[in-house]
Image (cartoon, rainbow, N blue to C red):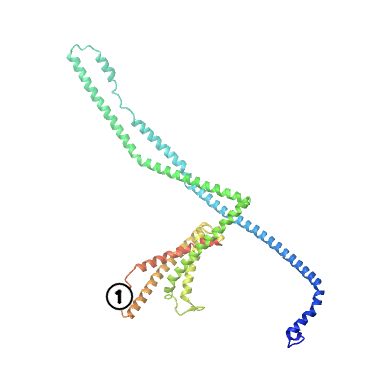
Amino acid sequence: MESLFLWPDRPVPSLFVLWLLSLPVLWAARRPMLELLGALGRHLGDGFAALAGGCRSLASDLSERNRAALLAAGELELRHKLDRELQRIDQGFADKLGKYSVLQRRVDDLTGDLENDYKHCGDVPPEVPGWGAAVETISSLPQNGDPHVQKILDGIKRSMQESQKKALQSHRDDASKRHKILGGMLPQLRDIKALLAKTRDLVDRALETTTRVNGYVDQYGSIQESSKETALSLGHSSVKLFLVSLAVLAIALGGAFINFQLIALPMSELVPAAARIGGVPISTVSALILVLMEVAIGIFLMDMLGITELFPRLATIPASRRRVILSIALFGLFFLAAVESSLAVLREQIVEADAALKLALAGAEDAAVLDASRSKIPVIGQAVLGFILPWIMATVAIPLEMLL
């Protein structure tokens, strides 16, 4: 820099003289520089305009692709819902409503028998046969105080009363028998009422299912029309589903942390304590692998139950193999839950032993040491928690699928 100065020991006068000498050159070069700067600005403006146009085109393409992806995802989800609802309707009609005709015939037969029995029970007592005409004929005879006629009339009266009593008693016995029959049919009436109530409930469920199917079909039609409102609705629902899944996964991570802390200490009793992997104790790695195994088994379990579809290939295998895989997953998860429950009990025993050792080293009495480990509530609580947490961790597959 000093080599440019006219007087190296006097920089200020040197700079002033250089400025004066450069003024004519700068004055002469002002127009070319302005044209150069203008051309450079125009080229930069054209370049930025082209870049902005490309960005707008890319944004439009991304928006169209995002809209198409949302519509495709919504269409696929509605197809799955329609398939599930139609399968439920098919199973309901095949298993339950297919027996409705047999039930209806049985109800008709029983109600017909009941109606006949009630009609017979409502019959009036029968009259004494032939006594009316005989009494009318004898009563028309002249009595004239004849004791024989009076005696005949008294005999007729007694015979008529006895016949009336017998007829009435016979009718009462018959009515009693019919009422006993009707009383014996009360359980059948209760069964009929229960069956009709069950049938009505099945019909209501079928109607509710058809209502849902109609709603899904309407949504599917709106998706096929590719309306803007449908895309916005699917976009809002996908964002909401993403946020909810993220929150549930965060809660699940908290549960996994508790699960890990519950089994990290007792795992040191099962694996070599001095062994390390990358500076991390192998007991810690083993506890982490155990938690991840529970999550992996839960993913397979949810896929086999048809709740998730993280592995679409599993949905195409036969039902018998699906049941086998489901049984293996349930057994594996139950085994891991039992192991974790036992580890939780072992952890509490280790903690109690450490506490008793500290009390003993501190010079506490034997009674105080025993009192410190007498309560069984923490042991039971940790055992139950260790058994339940793996089953809760198995449900992580549901929000994980929604998030992916």
Quadrant of the image occupied by residue 355: bottom left
The residue lying at 44 percent from left, 67 percent from top is 336
Q: How many marks can you see?
A: 1
Where is residue 229? Give x, y as percent: 61, 52
Left or right for 279, reference 349: right
Q: Residue at x 40, y 70 (%)?
A: 344
* Above or below: residue 157 compared with residue 180: above
Q: Is residue 93 visible?
A: no
| Towards the viewer: 6 or 146 | 6
Q: Which residue shows up at 49% across the image and 71% down it?
A: 289
User: Where's the C terminus, which quadrant?
Assistant: bottom right
Residue 139 percent across, percent down from the top left:
24, 15
**Which quadrant of the figure contains the N terminus?**
bottom right
Residue 298 in sight in this render: yes
Q: Position of residue 32 (x, y in %)?
A: 81, 71
Give the residue drawn at x 33%, y 78%: 359
Residue 294 shown left or right of residue 71 in the figure:
left
76 and 132: which one is in front? 76
* Pick the front one: 280 or 31: 31
Residue 11 appears left or right of 197: right
- Residue 26 in which image quadrant: bottom right
The residue carrying pointer 1 sits among few (fewer than 14), some (14 to 19) or many (20 or more) residues within 10 Å by Cα, namely few
Residue 312: x and y, percent?
Answer: 56, 60
Q: Is residue 178 above or below residue 56?
A: above
Residue with the mark numbered 1: 368
Under circle 1, the secondary element is helix
Whether 80 is drawn above or below 134: the answer is below
Left of 156 or right of it: where is 252? right
In the orientation shown, which residue stands out farthest toward the bottom? 9
Q: Amino acid at mark 1?
A: Ala
